[in-house]
Image (cartoon, coloured by chain):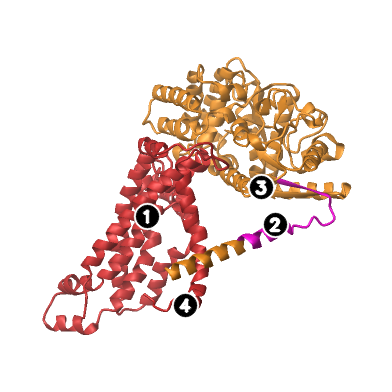
Chain colours: A red, B orange
């Protein structure tokens, strides 16, 4: 903690604090307040206690979206981290074109989620179907038109977008591993797998903390990719939590109910993320 | 403790200064020598340029009035913008609402416009959705209609007269004829049903078979505690027909594929759509759009030759604005729909099918609007009730259920039961 809490200190801090207060804290408290009323966006007439929250837990659409998001998050967290770490190991090898590859792998991350969704929609709907009809593979036609392929479509899209970003984090930590440790291990006659398992893996543990946190919170909060790729369809089977909340609030015009769902969503994501960070931290290796 | 107090003081001061600064911002709004400013907020972005042209014209002939048009696109975006501006105190003088549900949401902000000339000239039935006793709470933008938009050349080659397809059996026979000649006509299917767009199947197709339950009156639907759904069998029959003879994978087809790809490129003979697709088709092939397409009503037993025509949006005048401004707003709307210049702009610039009397003899700008206009002139129309469906009934029940039915994971009987039950539930808790 800083000890010099002079006027200048607070003055410099003020813009950030005011921003945080006005854009995050005040709206959040207001939202919390509105979630206990029958607010419709313009005014509210009465307090309704916890009934919005009770209704949320009985709302099959909300619960379905919840499960879908959890399943999606699990698959995405595992695959993005495995692929991200794999790519990072690949481009940190001494090989030609490593830098070019880094750029290429990172590129999808620079494209906005909405556009990515439309690009992949084209690939799944047109390109897959064309290949499927040409080669008579029926599994390739009709992607995004049923819940299973819709799910995998979303997963593939996210992996493609996020792996490059996670790769960057892993690269930073991989390059920070002191070469002498690896060399010593090599001289001692270890296999490459042993070096990965007992040296590299523990040394990049802090990267896991960061990457898991990022993939976890991102995959829970995902909205734009969902909107442009499947728009929740077919029959709301690929609707994620954020989309369910937006639709409740703005399409169905139940703003207070939407607020209640959003608060539940926030608490769940915050709880999972904090638990994850706490446990990952405990596993990090410390060199001293 | 002292630090906390200081922190609080600084935060309070900053908040206060921000509020003061922003207050200055709104107060300094200059009217530029004009006496009254009419602020208009509306959701048809595609008409933004034309509305601005009309506003500029109006300002020229009415030097004391300033007309500011703000267009915000897409259904949800528009409503949240309107709500935000209302609650932030930056309220428009005129805003658009889409039916009874939105009227009741903004009821406290809407003034009675029954004293306008336009309200007296509105075509019968077009004010049903916005009437409250003797009060009229909105003025129609325009009329839109839908049916089967067909490819004239393909129909001619197959020897089919579109005007004669007035019953289901005749339509079925024509569909079979077309299907048999698919190869010669270069078709991928007779129809293209966009399974991703629930509104095409529920709001539009559904309306045709649900409207008779409520005599085509949207207000009756909006207040009805129950959904009789007496024509569900007919509904299923028509949906099945479009689905069975559709090109491509139905559950993967969306609006743009249906209109641009399948219909625009002549790969299907007809699609269930409305007059709003004209611009899209014209972008692909101007000549085809102008001469090659026509529209017929969806055949319904007992309603032969009648086209579902309705009002997509209404102008509402804000009751919380100063009296003088409200008066100017009403005067502007009257000017737009009842004077010679205004009428010309409505038809030629906005390409609107008018919802008012006094337009007979005028020619619409495209064949689809012309079809809608002719049906209204000869009173061969039925109403739109889908704006009176209970809020979220389409989004959460009928829409997903129809998709489930088409994907064969729900039976039609279950769909009917769920539709009726959900309707009753939603209406009882409203």
**Which residue has dot 1 on it?**
A219
Image coordinates of residue A124 in percent, x first then y, are: 42, 50
Tag 1, which chain?
A: A
Could you tell me if residue A122 is visible in this image? no
Mark nearer the viewer, 4 or 3: 4
**Labels 4 and 3 in the same subunit:** no
Mark 2 or mark 4, which is nearer to you?
4
- State the separation of the CA atoms marked 1 and 3: 33 Å
Residue B365 locus on image (x, y percent): 75, 38
Position of residue A58 relative to residue B175, above or below, is below
Which tag, 4 or 1, sits closer to the chain's start? Answer: 4
**Mark 1 near mark 3, Cβ–Cβ under 8 Å?**
no
Determine whether the residue tagged by mark 3 lies in a helix, strand or loop. helix
Query: What segment carries the magenta color?
Result: B19-40
Question: Eyeballing the image, is A262 above or below B335?
Answer: below
Mark 2 crowdedness (10 Å alpha carbons): few <14, some 14-19, many ≥20: few
Q: Position of residue A61 (x, y in %)?
A: 39, 38
According to the picture, the residue beneath numbered tag 3 turns out to be B45
Vertically, is B418 above or below B285?
above
Q: Quadrant of residue B163?
A: top right
Q: Which residue is mark 2?
A: B26
Q: Residues within 10 Å of mark 4 (few under 14, many from 20)?
A: few
Foreground mark, 4 or 1?
Answer: 4
**Image quadrant in which you'd find residue A137:** top left
Q: Position of residue B44 (x, y in %)?
A: 66, 44
Chain hosting mark 4 = A
Q: Nearer the viewer, residue B127 or A134?
A: B127
Q: CA distance from mark 3 to mark 2?
A: 25 Å
Could you give the CA–CA distance between mark 4 and mark 3, rounded to whole angstroms?
Answer: 53 Å
First in sequence: mark 3 vs mark 2: 2
Question: Where is mark 4, residue-wise?
Answer: A6
């Amino acid at each position: 903690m800083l000890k010099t809490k002079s006027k200048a200190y607070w003055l410099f801090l003020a813009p950030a604090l005011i921003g945080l207060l006005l854009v995050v804290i005040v709206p959040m408290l207001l939202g919390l307040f509105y979630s206990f009323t029958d607010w419709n966006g313009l005014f509210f007439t009465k307090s309704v206690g916890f009934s919005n929250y009770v209704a949320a837990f009985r709302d099959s659409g909300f619960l379905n979206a919840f499960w879908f998001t959890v399943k999606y998050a699990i698959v995405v967290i595992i695959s993005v981290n495995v692929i991200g770490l794999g790519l990072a190991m690949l481009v940190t090898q001494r090989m030609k074109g490593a830098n070019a590859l880094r750029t290429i792998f990172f590129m999808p991350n620079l494209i906005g989620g909405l556009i990515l969704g439309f690009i992949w929609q084209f690939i799944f709907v047109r390109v897959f179907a064309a290949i499927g009809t040409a080669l008579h593979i029926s599994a390739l036609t009709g992607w995004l038109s049923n819940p299973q392929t819709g799910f995998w479509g979303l997963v593939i899209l996210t992996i493609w977008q996020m792996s490059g970003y996670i790769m960057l984090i892993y690269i930073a930590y991989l390059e920070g591993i002191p070469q002498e440790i690896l060399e010593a291990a090599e001289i001692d006659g270890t296999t490459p797998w042993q070096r990965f398992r007992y040296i590299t893996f523990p040394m990049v543990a802090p990267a896991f903390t960061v990457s898991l946190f990022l993939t976890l919170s991102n995959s829970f909060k995902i909205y734009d990719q969902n909107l442009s790729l499947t728009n929740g369809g077919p029959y709301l089977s690929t609707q994620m939590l954020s989309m369910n909340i937006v639709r409740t609030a703005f399409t169905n015009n139940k703003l207070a109910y939407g607020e209640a769902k959003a608060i539940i969503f926030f608490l769940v994501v915050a709880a999972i993320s904090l638990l994850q960070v706490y446990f990952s931290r405990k596993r990090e290796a410390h060199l001293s | 403790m002292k630090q906390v107090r200081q922190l609080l003081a600084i935060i309070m001061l900053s908040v206060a200064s921000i509020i003061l600064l922003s207050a200055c911002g709104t107060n300094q709004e200059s009217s530029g020598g004009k006496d009254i400013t009419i602020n208009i907020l509306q959701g048809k972005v595609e008409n933004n340029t034309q509305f601005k042209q009309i506003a500029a014209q109006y300002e020229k002939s009415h030097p004391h009035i300033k007309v500011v048009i703000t267009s915000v696109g897409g259904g949800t975006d528009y409503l949240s913008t309107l709500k935000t501006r209302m609650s932030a105190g930056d309220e428009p003088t005129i805003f658009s609402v889409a039916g009874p549900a939105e009227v009741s949401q903004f009821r406290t902000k809407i003034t009675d416009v029954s004293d306008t000339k336009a309200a007296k000239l509105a075509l019968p039935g077009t004010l049903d959705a916005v009437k409250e006793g003797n009060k009229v709470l909105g003025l129609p933008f325009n009329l839109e209609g839908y049916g089967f938009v067909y490819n004239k050349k393909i129909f001619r080659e197959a020897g089919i007269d579109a005007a004669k397809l007035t019953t289901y059996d005749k339509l079925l026979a024509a569909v079979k004829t077309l299907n048999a000649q698919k190869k010669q006509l270069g078709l991928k299917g007779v129809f293209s049903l966009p399974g991703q767009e629930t509104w095409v199947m529920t709001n539009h197709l559904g309306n045709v078979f649900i409207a008779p339950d409520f005599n085509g009156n949207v207000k009756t639907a909006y207040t009805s505690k129950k959904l009789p759904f007496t024509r569900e069998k007919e509904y299923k029959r028509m949906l099945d027909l479009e689905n069975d003879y559709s090109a491509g994978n139905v559950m993967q087809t969306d609006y743009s594929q249906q209109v641009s790809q399948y219909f625009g490129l002549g790969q299907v003979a007809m699609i269930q759509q409305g007059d709003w697709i004209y611009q899209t088709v014209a972008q692909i092939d101007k000549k085809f759009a102008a001469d090659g397409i026509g529209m017929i009503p969806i055949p319904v037993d007992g309603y032969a030759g009648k086209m579902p025509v309705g009002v997509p949006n209404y102008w509402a005048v804000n009751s919380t604005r100063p009296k003088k401004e409200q008066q100017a707003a009403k005067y502007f709307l009257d000017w737009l729909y009842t004077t010679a210049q205004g009428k010309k702009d409505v038809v030629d610039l906005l390409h609107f099918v008018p919802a008012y009397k006094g337009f007979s003899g005028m020619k619409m700008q495209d064949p689809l609007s012309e079809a809608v206009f002719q049906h209204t002139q000869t009173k061969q129309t039925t109403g739109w009730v889908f704006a009176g469906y209970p809020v979220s009934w389409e989004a959460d029940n009928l829409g997903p259920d129809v998709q489930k039915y088409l994907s064969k994971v729900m039976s039609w009987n279950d769909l009917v039961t769920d539709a009726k039950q959900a309707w009753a539930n939603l209406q009882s808790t409203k």
